[in-house]
Amino acid sequence: MFSMMNILLFVVLVVVLIVAETFCKSSTSLLFKLSSFSTIKRAEKSIGKVVTTDAKFLLEDKLPVGLNRETIPKHVAVIMDGNRRWAKNKGLEPMLGHEAGVRSLVKLLPLCRNWGIKVLTVYAFSTENWIRPKVEVDFLMKLFEKILKEELDSFMRQEVRISVIGDSKKLPRSLQKCITKVTETTKRNSGCHLIMAVNYSGRTDIVLACQRISNKVKDGLIQPEDIDERLITHELETKCTEFPYPDLLIRTSGELRLSNFLMWQLAYTELYFDESFWPDFGEKEFVQALQSFQRRQRRFGGQNDDKLVDQKS
């Protein structure tokens, strides 16, 4: 009898354990479902915020009427001409023209970023500009340093990467330090790449590239027959960008020359000349330049129906 009672108690205990385990599993499953439901709801709210933000971003990125995003140039180069004449026409000192020109450049950057232009290269100071009055040259050097310092936070917010090409060794020491800091700080930004040509010469750029290549031949690193267009391009100062060849060159103030700017890189670039002085070159003028670019057929020496050549290096 005692043995039978023990068996019954053992069976009851097993049943109780089975029921308890089933209840625990059900409770855990229920809790997991509730937790998952809560997580999903939070995720849906987050997604809603993201979608709202993306919609706002897309709205901000909307192109002006008349522009096609598919044919927006990847790389635009600008000769910012007419600052001094703009100031003279207004009875102002030349320095105020240069300051107004800097403001025009700063206003152009968010447009480039929003419209999909990857690279903006500007001719800020040529090697020939040293012959200008010393007081003007000194002012320009200080202005370059000032704009780099004051706009650094803006560059970071807008994801603008800064590079400076040209012979920086001849620039004031404080400007050299400033350039080093800004280029290092912004090097990972991917919104738009602003390349500033300061103390730059297109011909010198090519000469120095040839010298570096000849040294590689002399050192046995390459053979003369290895020298081709791609190798030369990779030795030029615009090697700092993924798109070294400008699709469009804009020059303001009505001048119709290249002035020793990117002489190799501009071989197949579309040229656009605007009568406006650079400080007056704003969004409307920029849109007109881009519209002119998009109306053209870029054949690179081919026929109308030829597939366009991608100059990405």
Image: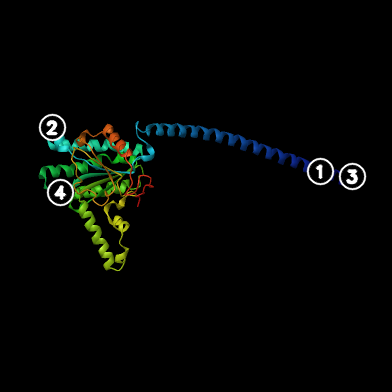
CA gap between label 2 and label 3 equals 121 Å
Q: Which residue is mark 1?
A: 11
- Kindly check if marks 3 and 1 are in contact, taking CB atoms under 8 A apart as contact: no
CA gap between label 4 and label 1 equals 102 Å
Write down the quadrant of residue 116 in the picture: top left
Q: Residues within 10 Å of mark 1 (few under 14, many from 20)?
A: few
Q: Secondary structure at mark 2?
A: helix
Q: Residue drawn 31% across and 39% down?
A: 293
CA gap between label 3 and label 1 equals 15 Å
Horizontally, is 29 left or right of 221 in the view? right
How many numbered discs, if any? 4
Kind of residue indicated by mark 2: Asn
Q: Which mark is residue 1?
A: 3
Query: Could you say which is closer to the camera, residue 293 or residue 164?
Result: 293
Q: As displayed, is residue 61 above or below residue 192?
A: above
Q: Residues within 10 Å of mark 4 (few under 14, many from 20)?
A: few
- Dot 3 or dot 1: first in sequence order is 3
- Dot 4 or dot 2: first in sequence order is 2
Q: Secondary structure at mark 4?
A: helix
Query: Could you say which is closer to the camera, residue 164 or residue 270?
Result: 270
Kind of residue indicated by mark 1: Val
Q: Residues within 10 Å of mark 3 (few under 14, many from 20)?
A: few
- Dot 4 or dot 1: first in sequence order is 1
Q: Secondary structure at mark 1?
A: helix
Q: Which residue is mark 2?
A: 89
CA gap between label 1 and label 2 equals 106 Å
CA gap between label 3 and label 4 equals 117 Å
Kind of residue indicated by mark 3: Met
Q: Which residue is mark 4?
A: 128
**Mark 4 or 1, closer to the camera:** 4
